[in-house]
Amino acid sequence: MYFSKSEFIPDDKVAEMTQRAAQRAIQIGTEDFGIHLDGTGDSIRGLDEILDRMRRSQLPEEEAQRLGRVFGSYFGEILRQAHGAIWGVGAGI
C-alpha cells in the first residue's frame, strides 16, 4: 500500500526505536556472526550472509522473529539514509 503525503505522519519514537535496533544489528553482526556492518549500502552483502546463516541454523521462531526485526531495521536505516527519508506511520494504521 502506498501512502499519499497527507496520510503519512512522521514519528520520532518510531525513528528512535528503529535506529536503536539498527545499532543493535551492528553489534550482533560483529559479536555473533563475525561480520562487520557499517551502516552503508556496501554492508548489505554482509547482512545477506547473516540472514542466510540464520536461515540455515533453524533458530526458534521467537528468536528468528526478533532478529528479523533487528536486521530489518538495519536494512531500513540504510535505505532511509540513502534516500533522505524519515520514519513515521500511516494515518489509521
Image (cartoon, rainbow, N blue to C red):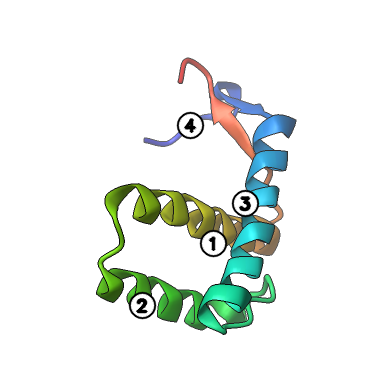
**Along the line of sight, which residue is nearer the eye, 86 or 27?**
27
CB within 8 Å, label 2 to label 3? no
Could you say which quadrant of the image residue 49 lies in? bottom left
Within 10 angstroms of label 2, few (less than 14), some, or many (20 or more) residues? few
Mark 3 or mark 1: which comes first in sequence? Answer: 3
**Label 3: which residue?**
21
User: How far apart are the two marked residues, 3 and 1, measured between alpha carbons?
Assistant: 10 Å
Query: Which residue is depicted at the point 58% across and 60% down?
Result: 74
The numbered disc on residue 3 is: 4
Would you say 20 lies left or right of 91 here?
A: right
Q: Please, what secondary structure does the residue beneath circle 4 have?
A: loop
Q: Please, what secondary structure does the residue beneath circle 1 have?
A: helix
User: How far apart are the two marked residues, 2 and 4, measured between alpha carbons?
Assistant: 34 Å
Q: Disc 1 residue type? A: Phe
Tell me if residue 63 comes above or below residue 36 in the rendering: above
User: How far apart are the two marked residues, 4 and 3, measured between alpha carbons?
Assistant: 24 Å
**Label 2: which residue?**
53
CB within 8 Å, label 2 to label 4? no
Mark 2 or mark 4: which comes first in sequence? Answer: 4
Query: Which residue is depicted at the point 36% across and 35% down?
Result: 1
Mark 2 or mark 3: which comes first in sequence? Answer: 3
